[in-house]
Image (cartoon, helix red, strand yellow):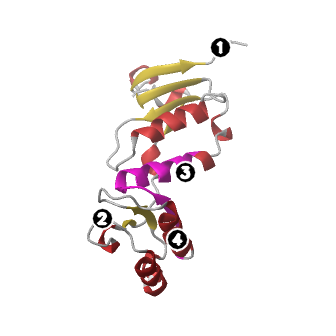
Amino acid sequence: MSDENSIINKVASSGLLSLDLEELYPQGKRTVFDITPLLWEGIALKEKDFRAFVKDHDWAQYHGQFVSVHCSADAIIPTWAFMLVAVHLQQHATFVTQGDAEQLERALFTDLIQQLDVEHYRDARIVVKGCSKLPVPLNAYVELTAKLLPVVKSLMFGEPCSTVPLYKAPKA
């Protein structure tokens, strides 16, 4: 086969770097610790009973998990109650935050993106991959954009063969 008939991969030779948030997806069990079952008559927290539960509960069962502390009932829970649960979870869980399952995912990705070293992307043309099979929350894309803008030459969304341009750095 002659060179004129060979297939050229234009995507590979385009100089685009693909960034897939799904590849950064934190692996591990997610758990929402719901305070609701600990409420007295479903409406209030009795401090003495709550403290007894916290003291006797097997916190080791959350070892290595991503845990969010939440109250699914429409009840007023004092801030210290969430903090007390966090004190005990912190010794065992990999990550602790407050909120429901969606808020847990959001917090995980916020933490992940804050720790992301973007120097690898300096002056690069980046495509943030759009399709994912895992539940990557929307805030992850927004926070990633804010983190990348100061260093990238250009930012696009989609797939390298079909991108939506988002940003192009001004020429110096």
Amino acid type indicated by mark 2:
Ile
User: Label 4 belongs to which residue?
Assistant: 84
Amino acid type indicated by mark 3:
Leu
User: Label 3 belongs to which residue?
Assistant: 112
Local packing at callout 4 (Cα closer than 10 Å; few below 14, some 14-19, many 20+) is few
**Between marks 2 and 3, how big is the CA–CA gap?**
36 Å
Q: Which numbered disc, 1 or 2, marks the residue that appears first in the sequence?
A: 2
**Between marks 4 and 3, how big is the CA–CA gap?**
25 Å
CB-based contact (under 8 Å), mark 4 and mark 3 = no
Q: Residue at x 62, y 29 (%)?
A: 124
Q: In which quarter of the image is the N terminus?
A: top left
Q: In which quarter of the image is residue 121?
A: top right
* Residue found at the far left of this picture: 41
Question: Is residue 36 covered in magenta?
Answer: no
Dot 1 falls on a residue whose secondary structure is loop
Q: Residue at x 48, y 26 (%)?
A: 156
User: Label 1 belongs to which residue?
Assistant: 170
Amino acid type indicated by mark 1:
Pro
Local packing at callout 2 (Cα closer than 10 Å; few below 14, some 14-19, many 20+) is some
Q: Which residue is drawn at 48% across and 34% down?
A: 142
**7, 116: nearer the viewer:** 116
Question: Is residue 107 covered in magenta?
Answer: yes
Can you tell which mark lies on residue 43?
2
Dot 4 falls on a residue whose secondary structure is helix
Q: Which numbered disc, 2 or 4, marks the residue that appears first in the sequence?
A: 2
- Residue 137, x across and y down, in percent: 39, 44
Bounds of the magenta span? 92-113
Q: Which numbered disc, 4 or 3, marks the residue that appears first in the sequence?
A: 4
| Total tally of numbered discs in the picture | 4
Can you tell which mark lies on residue 117?
none
Q: Which numbered disc, 3 or 1, marks the residue that appears first in the sequence?
A: 3
